[in-house]
């Protein structure tokens, strides 16, 4: 591996990398990408929606509740689904643009410090936020699978915990390009056989007096 000195830069306050700007303060969305989002016209075809959702999804860790917000748009991309742009789609499109252009700085994780994971579940999806020293490291969320829509409340909440704590593994270079990251195959309801150093608690708030 060789480096050409004339193409190298040293002692930079920040650096652009894969659509992000990284500095000592943390990670933010590249302003050039923000400008692209602001100028994005309303999708008129399934392909348009897929392009916009693809860009927004790349920055989903900056957006709290991403899966819930994007649901009306992804609904239009399903097979045999007529393309009818309704008010819910317009609100979803506008809200994603607003969230992407006003996203917060994500702090860089420090492996020497403890992490806090807050998770929640509803019949609209599962979500969590990874924090450290009361600052956001990343957001994560996903829509419910078909069988999860019938879960009782306590199973749904547990599904959120499992989804948030499921580890990721990198795919090696020669494997098929089905994704750079893929979830490890762990049966969701066999976590009682896995030993982990987690401290689980209920965050105090005025709305969780009846929480399980």
Image (tube, rainbow, N blue to C red):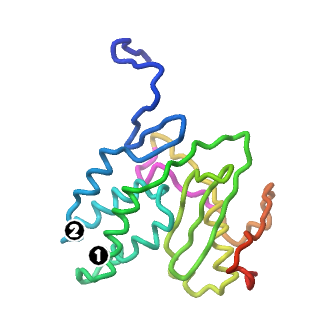
For marks 1 and 2, give the CA distance: 8 Å
Which of the two residues, 23 or 60, is positioned nearer the viewer here?
A: 23
Left or right: where 48 falls relative to 212 = left
Is residue 172 shown above or below 3? below
The stretch in magenta equals: 175-185
Provide the secondary structure element on which disc 1 rests. Answer: helix
Instruction: Give the tally of numbered discs.
Output: 2
* Residue 164 image offset from top left, x and y in percent: 62, 63
Residue at figure coordinates x 40%, y 50% from the top left:
177
Labels 1 and 2: the sequence-earlier one? 2
**How many other residues sit within 10 Å of disc 2, few (<14), some (14-19) or many (≥20)?**
some
Which of the two residues, 188 or 15, is positioned nearer the viewer here?
A: 15
* Residue 88 image offset from top left, x and y in percent: 33, 81
- Mark seen at residue 37: none
In which quadrant of the rendered view does residue 16 lie?
top left
What residue sits right under mark 1 in the picture? 90
Instruction: Determine whether label 1 and label 2 are within 8 Å by CB.
Output: yes
Left or right: where 206 falls relative to 93 = right
Is residue 103 shown above or below 13? below
* Residue 124 image offset from top left, x and y in percent: 50, 79
- Mark seen at residue 42: 2
Residue at figure coordinates x 40%, y 19% from the top left:
9
């Amino acid at each position: 591996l060789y480096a050409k000195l004339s193409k190298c830069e040293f002692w930079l306050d920040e650096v652009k990398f894969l659509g992000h700007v990284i500095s000592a303060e943390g990670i933010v969305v590249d302003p050039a990408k923000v400008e692209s989002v602001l100028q994005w016209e309303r999708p008129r075809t399934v392909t348009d929606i897929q392009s916009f959702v693809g860009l927004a999804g790349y920055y989903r860790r900056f957006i709290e509740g991403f899966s819930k917000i994007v649901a009306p748009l992804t609904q239009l991309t399903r097979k045999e689904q007529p393309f009818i742009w309704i008010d819910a789609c317009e609100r979803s499109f506008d809200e994603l643009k607003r969230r992407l252009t006003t996203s917060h700085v994500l702090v860089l994780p420090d492996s020497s410090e403890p992490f806090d994971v807050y998770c929640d579940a509803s019949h609209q999806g599962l979500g969590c936020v990874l924090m450290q020293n009361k600052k956001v490291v990343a957001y994560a969320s996903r829509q419910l699978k078909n069988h999860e829509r019938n879960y009782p409340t306590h199973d749904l909440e547990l599904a959120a915990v499992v989804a948030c704590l499921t580890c990721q593994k990198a795919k090696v270079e020669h494997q098929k390009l089905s994704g750079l990251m893929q979830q490890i195959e762990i049966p969701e309801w066999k976590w009682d056989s896995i030993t982990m150093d987690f401290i689980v608690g209920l965050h105090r708030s005025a709305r969780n007096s009846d929480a399980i």
